[in-house]
Amino acid sequence: MSFEKINLIRPIQKALQEEGYKSPTPIQERSIPIILKGKDLLGCAQTGTGKTAAFAIPILQLLSEVKKTAYKKRTIRSLIVTPTRELAIQIGDSFSAYGKHTGLKNAVVFGGVKQRIQTDKLNSGVDILVATPGRLLDLMNQGYISLHAIELFVLDEADRMLDMGFINDVNKIIRKLPTKRQSLFFSATMPAEIVKLAKTILDKPVKVEVTPESSTVEKIKQSVYYVAKPDKKRLLVHLLDDQSIESALVFSRTKHGANKIAQILSKKKIKAEAIHGDKSQNSRQRALHNFKSKETRVLVATDIAARGIDIDELSHVINYDLPNIPETYVHRIGRTGRAGLEGTAFSFCDTEEREFLKDINKLIKKSIHVVDNHPFTTPTEITEKPSLPAEKQNRAKVKTSKESKTTETKSRRRKRNPKKAFVNKGRN
Ligand code: AMP
């Protein structure tokens, strides 16, 4: 299948050729014709599947085909709402790249930076707006943005919107949209709440689903290192001694952890930077740029900051902390092994994280290979066989079973309410 078969207009075909795209990805092949027919779409796809182009290409085509002359100046006719600044910037870049011969203009607005550059751009007139929810509402309230002419609306990464607590903002935005419009809704997962939200936005949507979470990881070489928590730093430095690891994205559960890991690596003369929600937009962009240009070898990130980061040639992902949500593991390691390249994922697992590993193995339907010959190894199973006299052994047994009860209760509690278990540690 080639892009020509989808009947794309010449200016878009040309731009795609210049981007080096030869054929559409499965989500593009299936979604573009549906969107071009004017239908609403419910897309179940994660970052890395080519979903941005799946909505950007047909939006550009539809807006180019029907030129609006009713407005004196350019008016926002398409709105894309996405949860993070990084995603917003990347989506804006995609519209600029695929639309560079169409004459259509886009702007990107997100919080955490001064609004002046964004409002200047809006005042100069744009056709397509990419926005994060908070800044969008803010600029709407100040009168810089009106949604009255929106013909095409996209809600991107809906499940992440929910996770990040943007649902009220999203509802406020939806209420301001014209009722006559075409809507596209994308989410990596479809829990009940997301299905409910989709129903409020979409009208008789066509559902398109690509690559179930678990199958995307098959081509990635995965291994797990059992290691005591305090030894994780040394294990990381030890692994990075291998110079064949060209670039590694290291995941930390907390922002503080990410900073610490980057500091430890820098002390060991391993070029590393951290990226998370407490960093300014400029420093996040700079860190990302340095990593992409291979100036820094290691980028340490939290899940939310890393969401949507688009790095084509990433050889290694390292889970310094295992995620408590197994789908997050799949998202994380899916950053490597892209575009047919080989990918490797290492995961560190301390005793408290063994439950998480079990959940991950269950989701991906295989047991990740355990590396047991590393310098900081801890036993695979904790077996306690005290060689004590009978009476003392009994006392020891009582103590052991009490201890294990406490551990079990804690881990069960964490499984039941993972967010609460980490509430004091901060998740971004
Ligand atoms: P996304 O899922 O939208 O984040 O896209 C992931 C990556 O795939 C981006 O780097 C895109 O530039 C790239 N990409 C999207 N569509 C294609 C295509 N048809 N051919 C080659 N690369 C693509």
Image (cartoon, rainbow, N blue to C red):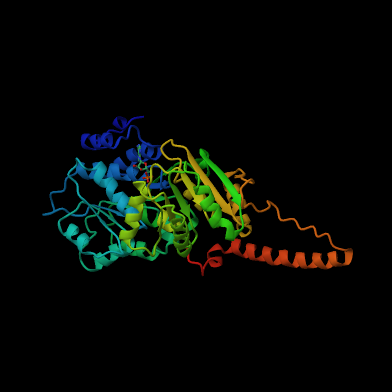
Residue 202 x/y as whole percent: 37, 52
Q: Is residue 183 above or below residue 12?
A: below
Residue 191 x/y as whole percent: 49, 55
Report the front residue among 56 and 415: 415
Residue 165 vs residue 406: left or right? left
Q: Residue at x 36, y 61 (%)?
A: 170
Residue 140 x/y as whole percent: 25, 65
Residue 418 occupies quadrant = bottom right
Residue 101 vs residue 310: left or right? left
Report the front residue among 51 and 276: 276
**Residue 197 in view here:** no
How many marks do you count on the picture?
0
Q: Quadrant of the N terminus?
A: top left
Residue 171 occupies quadrant = bottom left
Q: Quadrant of the C terminus?
A: bottom left
Q: Is residue 398 above or below residue 23?
A: below
Residue 256 x/y as whole percent: 46, 65
Q: Residue furthest left?
A: 72
Q: Residue at x 84, y 64 (%)?
A: 393
Q: Residue furthest right?
A: 390
**Residue 220 in view here:** yes
Report the front residue among 192 and 9: 9
Quadrant for ligand 1 reads top left
Residue 72 occupies quadrant = bottom left
Residue 8 vs residue 251: left or right? left
